[in-house]
Image: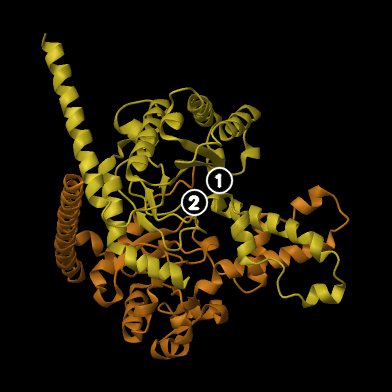
Chain colours: A yellow, B orange
Amino acid sequence: MKNAGIDKAIEILGKLVRFLRKSMIHIISVGPMPDHVAFIMDGNRRFARKNNLSEAAGYRIGLLALISCVKYCSELGVRYVTFYAFSIDNFKRRSDEIQPLMDLFLEYIEGLMKEGSIVSRYGIRVYFQGNLKLFSEPVRLAAENAMLATAHNSKLFLIVCLAYTSTNEIVHAVQESCEEKWGGAILLNENEKNDAESFVKVTDIDKNMYMAIAPEPDILIRTSGDTRLSNFLLWQTTCTYLYFPSAFWPEIGFRHLLWAILNFQRHHQYLTKRKKQG
Amino acid sequence: MDLKDEMQRVRFWVNQIGNFCLRLVWHFVHLLVRSWYLGVGVANVIESYLISSGLLRRYRFIDVGKLRYLAIVVESDDACQISKVIQLLQWLQAFGVKHLCLYDTEGVLKKSKESILAKLKNATLFEEADERDLLLDQKHMTLEFASITDGKEAVAKGGNLLFMKYLKLANSGAEQKEQIFTEANLTEALRAVGYGGPEPDLLLVYGPARCHLGFPAWRIRYTEIIHMGPLKSMRYGSLVKAIYKFTMVRQNYGT
């Protein structure tokens, strides 16, 4: 009897929270809304230590936070959501730290393809961007299959950066640009090659970036209070509003997104002017 | 028909009133946000005064040696206030900062390079600096000036240098070609085309919003970024606090 009463109270509270959230979204949608939000999911291990949990548990709760953020972004009308899931630098960790993460990635990617998953409910197209060749074959294949399976969706684009660093992305884009230009340049004589000011231009590099599939981020959120980009989207964040809340990644909530968007709206005119001048 | 028209008119006016009320609430929410920042601003001014007057003990002794290279990003519209820029540099020089990069998107600071160097004592251009100057004079500072052309365009120039090497290997195998395109080689190429500045440890942004405004991407991989507010309201105490916060940071570089 008592349990039924508590369940009912929790249900009503849940409905009230959802109503308040939707009302707040309705209000802030009067102003300019971001098209692309990027996240650096920092603090899973520190959250686990703070709450006496295993690291694996910290990452699992972090995954739930990722799913919540995707839902909130969908409700907010954000079209592109990017997450920094695994940096090339993270390969330096011990193998007993990396393996649970790889297992979690596989589980998550396979979960995305199931009927009734967040991907099918919200019409999400998934991209895994980065140097995927650095991963084992099962993870790489699962990522490629997920991208194929969700290719028909177009309501929201979920970009998960795996085996990614900005500097690696830039080098890769330069390489791709050089390979494109090779055919034309090889036909020139030595003098013409030396006279040519530039074969590779910024626009060539731009279109060969892993992140060329999305516009530049409007907001970048890094949790845990650290105020650096850690080699993430350095090329794309010229006029991106940076927000560094002190909460750990598993603690992120709608209130953080709301605060980021309110600040984005405050500076929108200035950032748009800077973007046009750039 | 009249009733239908009437209903449409009523619906239109209800929508208009609804939108107007929503707009009012939106403005009210932003008013609350502005009030919050006003309060934070007042608290920062008080804290800055306490830091400058030495009343807050933890800010009295700061190990500035940890700050090997500092970058300052200034909003181009504010960069014309050369006297403010010089005052900031004088504070940093007195604090013991040795190497500094001044950046603004449009290159206003680059154009004022001569007048800035003339007004500062014991400061030389980073490219012309000599190790002897730095060893002889504790307060000697090197200055680098950068703008948006030192970012993406520089990478394109570096990329072209790698491309010329790539062309020379026209008949070689794929493995040899792969070895050209590495981060180390691109860093070397950037140095060769004149864009080899070091990575700053700390980037202070003087502008309305927290964003790096296109500071060369290749150089801010692990740089701490702190937003200082507009240049016109810069305070010595806030500068000290920012450098102190930087000295307390522990990075694990992804491990």
Q: Position of residue B230 (x, y in %)?
A: 29, 72
Element type at mark 1 = strand
Residue corresponding to mark 2: A232
Please give the chain letter of the residue carrying mark 2. Answer: A
In the picture provided, is B111 more to the left or to the right than A223?
right
User: What residue appears at the point 36 percent right and 29 percent down from the top-left corner?
Assistant: A61
Q: Amino acid at mark 1?
A: Tyr
Q: Amino acid at mark 2?
A: Phe
Element type at mark 2 = loop
Residue corresponding to mark 1: A164
Q: CA distance from mark 2 to mark 1?
A: 8 Å
User: What residue appears at the point 24 percent right and 73 percent down from the top-left corner?
Assistant: B235
Residue B196 is at least partly visible in this image: no
User: What residue appears at the point 60 percent right and 34 percent down from the top-left corner?
Assistant: A148
Query: With respect to residue B36, does A89 lie above or below?
Result: above
Could you say which is closer to the camera, residue A264 or residue B20? B20
Q: What label sits on residue B32 in the rendered view?
A: none
